[in-house]
Amino acid sequence: MNSIPSETPSIRVLIVEDDPMMQLGLEQSLSNTEGITVLGQAEDGYRAVEAAMRLMPDVIVMDIGLPRLDGIAATQKIKAMLPTVRVVMLTSHTANNEVVAALASGADAYCVKGTSVDGLIRAIASAHEGASYLDPIVARQVMEQLKPPLSSAESTAVGQLSPRELEVLKLMVEGRSNPEIATVLYLSPNTVKTHVRGIMNKLAVDDRVQAAVVALRAGLV
């Protein structure tokens, strides 16, 4: 049987996963881990929010690719209502923009599906203790981007963004597409495209991920 360090209090976990086989595997692995109690499971983002409010878990193991409401949006909703709940993203997604968006949403740890049970338990324990955890597969690439402080030129560039551009940038950090941003802000897709182009020009970056990294380092999210 796996276990977490004896000095760590029992951790109450909610599993959010829409793949039945993955859900079963997680439930069995975590239920067999000394020091972890599985409170329940949810299959989509909306049910995750409801279950979090009802069960009040310590840690949520959250998939990103969920039906109805994705894991990033669900995490944002849960964190807004239950800021002390810790979230471990467990996903097959390793693209930089999705990792950055997951962390920006309030996720406390990021594990890639296929990681060992010990790795997942370590992530859960770290999150529960208030620390951050990145799967080694993605840690190096993300941390290399997030580590440098803002240069004076970047600080100046961020200060030149208009209020509307800041709204668009914050949604970009969340991993929203141009059509999704248009819907949220009640703008046309062409207008959003123009704002995105203006943001990248002002920040002197080549893509949306780099823009999101500047926003995170500037503390905009």
Image (tube, helix red, strand yellow):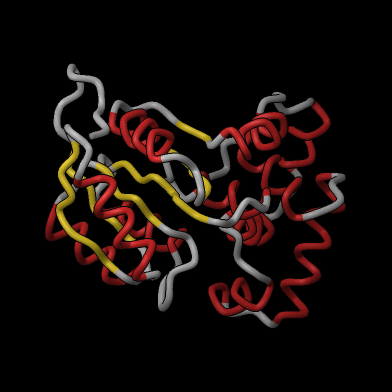
Q: Residue at x 43, y 69 (%)?
A: 66
Q: In the orientation shown, which residue stands out farthest toward the front?
A: 1
Q: In the orientation shown, which residue stands out farthest toward the top?
A: 7
Q: Nearer the viewer, residue 137 or 82?
A: 137
Q: Quadrant of the N terminus?
A: top left
Residue 43's x, y, as percent? 32, 70
Residue 27's x, y, as percent? 25, 54
Q: In the orientation shown, which residue stands out farthest toward the bottom?
A: 188
Q: Nearer the viewer, residue 190 or 85?
A: 85
Instruction: Tell me if 34 is positioned left or right of 63 in this view.
Output: left
Q: Is residue 147 above or below residue 187?
A: above
Labels in figure, total: 0
Instruction: Tell me if 126 is positioned left or right of 35 in this view.
Output: right
The image quadrant that residue 138 belongs to is top right
Instruction: Tell me if 200 is positioned left or right of 184 in this view.
Output: right
Residue 106's x, y, as percent? 43, 45
Q: Nearer the viewer, residue 81 or 59?
A: 59
Q: Is residue 69 above or below residue 122?
A: below
Residue 93's x, y, as percent? 59, 56
Q: Is residue 58 above or below residue 74?
A: above
Q: Residue at x 47, y 32 (%)?
A: 133
Q: Residue at x 49, y 66 (%)?
A: 65
Q: Residue at x 47, y 50 (%)?
A: 105
